[in-house]
């Protein structure tokens, strides 16, 4: 329970969650891969344009599956941004491989393809691109590099359900993609996620890895008469109660996205003048991408300015937060990874970025958030 009057995130139900959970219980299957899991998979395929979607219990799980599908061996390298959540890197480290961090673009805060190109070695096996704040990374440039060097391209689309890049949906832009339905995301099931697969060569193995290394999915489709251990894997699938909750949310995906995008646009309008005066920096949206209202952030002058802003908001009962502590300088990063380049943009962004409250029922609080923020930011320096 948050002590803040306006929390950073407030999960809410949006439709038929309770009805579907009761229905799942009545149907008598609570384990995974039942009625609601299949409905979620089909809906996620529609919302991402991906060839195949497999529900997982988290985006972390989907990233771990992706790392197994990349066939990483100890010493192999995977290029990724340092400005991301720990799971992007951890998935690779769990395979004994090495995350190689490169810097981000100062406008989009997404991985910079120029740095990716320079970081490729004969050990590189894959690129994990993160769609920061829901805005897709420059996937055409990354796909070019992947094609040239025979690398697997993965979208960490944890934050990007419904976003587009050059008219194509996030999740349809790489060999593999990972989505999150954690309660801080747009579409939620508490914990939850999905692996999406566009490379047809990886589909069957993905099903096996998700089902503890067995060919149970083929058995359930009647393609084999018993199921057995065939590969490495784990239990990556959620139960039906989670899927039932999630399906009710997925049904409302466009409404939820539109609401959040409305709050995003409202924030932008409120801070536009201060941005024009150079007091702060707003999210920059490349013309060829559309977002999904996942996150609204500001970048302030320096770490002291940002920390004082957060304290000002906190004193007014509003939870504004920063992230990420760059992975390259975190204790785990120092132990398990290496950096290619000086990571200057990542370090600066990490010091100056602050996220404002964003959730589907923000209408009662957004004016207070804006007024309180302007109370700090409009003061002469
Ligand atoms: C970029 C990114 N990757 C991965 C994750 C992990 O998602 P989950 O909590 O569903 O495992 C998150 C969650 O915040 C994220 O933002």
Image (cartoon, rainbow, N blue to C red):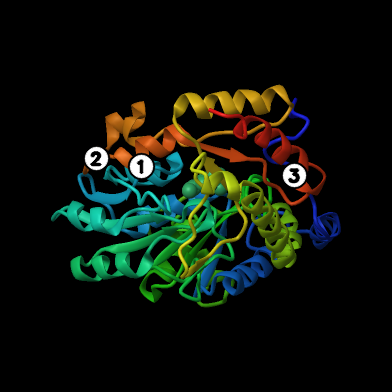
- Locate residue 27 relative to residue 288 in the image: left or right: right
225 relative to 379, above or below: below
Q: Residue 4: x percent and y percent?
A: 74, 28
Front residue of 255/100: it is 255
Q: Which residue is mark 2?
A: 339
Q: Which residue is mark 1?
A: 82
Q: CA distance from mark 1 to mark 3?
A: 31 Å
Front residue of 229/240: it is 240
315 relative to 80, above or below: above
Q: Earlier in the sequence, mark 2 or mark 3?
A: 2
Q: Do the numbered discs 2 and 3 sit on residues whose CB atoms are within 8 Å?
A: no
**Which mark is nearer the camera, 1 or 3?**
3
Q: Residue 365: x percent and y percent?
A: 78, 41
| Residue shown at 36% from the left, 40% from the top | 346
Farthest left residue?
122
Q: Earlier in the sequence, mark 2 or mark 1?
A: 1
| Residue shown at 61% from the left, 29% from the top | 379
| Residue shown at 43% from the left, 72% from the top | 198
Q: Which residue is mark 3?
A: 366
Callout 1 environment at 10 Å: few (<14), some (14 to 19), or many (20+)? many
75 relative to 50, above or below: above
């Amino acid at each position: 329970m948050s002590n803040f009057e306006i929390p950073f995130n407030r999960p809410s139900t949006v439709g038929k969650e309770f009805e579907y959970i009761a229905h799942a219980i009545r149907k008598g299957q609570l384990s995974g891969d039942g009625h609601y899991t299949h409905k979620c998979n089909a809906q996620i395929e529609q919302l991402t344009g991906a060839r195949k979607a497999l529900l997982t219990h988290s985006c972390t799980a989907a990233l771990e599956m992706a790392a197994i599908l990349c066939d990483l061996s100890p010493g192999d390298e995977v290029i990724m941004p340092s400005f991301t959540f720990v799971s992007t890197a951890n998935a690779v480290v769990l395979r004994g491989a090495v995350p190689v961090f490169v810097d981000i673009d100062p406008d989009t805060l997404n991985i910079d393809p120029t740095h990716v190109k320079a970081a490729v070695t004969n050990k590189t096996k894959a690129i994990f691109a993160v769609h920061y704040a829901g805005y897709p990374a420059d996937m055409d440039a990354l796909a070019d590099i992947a094609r040239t060097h025979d690398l697997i391209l993965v979208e960490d689309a944890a934050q990007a359900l419904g976003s587009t890049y050059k008219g194509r949906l996030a999740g349809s832009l790489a060999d593999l993609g990972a989505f999150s339905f954690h309660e801080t995301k747009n579409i939620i099931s508490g914990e939850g996620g999905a692996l999406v697969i566009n490379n047809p060569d990886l589909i069957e193995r993905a099903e096996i890895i998700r089902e503890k290394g067995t060919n149970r999915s083929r058995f359930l489709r009647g393609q084999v008469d018993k199921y057995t251990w065939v590969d490495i894997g784990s239990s990556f699938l959620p139960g039906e109660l989670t899927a039932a909750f999630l399906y009710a949310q997925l049904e409302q995906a466009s409404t939820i996205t539109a609401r959040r995008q409305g709050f995003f646009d409202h924030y932008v309008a409120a801070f536009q003048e201060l941005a024009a005066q150079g007091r702060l920096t707003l999210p920059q949206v490349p013309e060829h991408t559309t977002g999904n209202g996942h996150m609204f952030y500001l970048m302030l002058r320096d770490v002291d300015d940002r920390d004082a802003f957060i304290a000002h908001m906190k004193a007014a009962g509003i939870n504004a937060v920063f992230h990420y502590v760059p992975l390259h300088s975190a204790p785990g990063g120092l132990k398990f990874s290496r950096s290619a380049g000086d990571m200057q943009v990542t370090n600066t962004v990490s010091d100056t970025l602050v996220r404002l409250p964003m959730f589907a029922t923000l209408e009662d609080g957004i004016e207070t958030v804006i007024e309180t923020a302007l109370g700090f930011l409009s003061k002469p320096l």
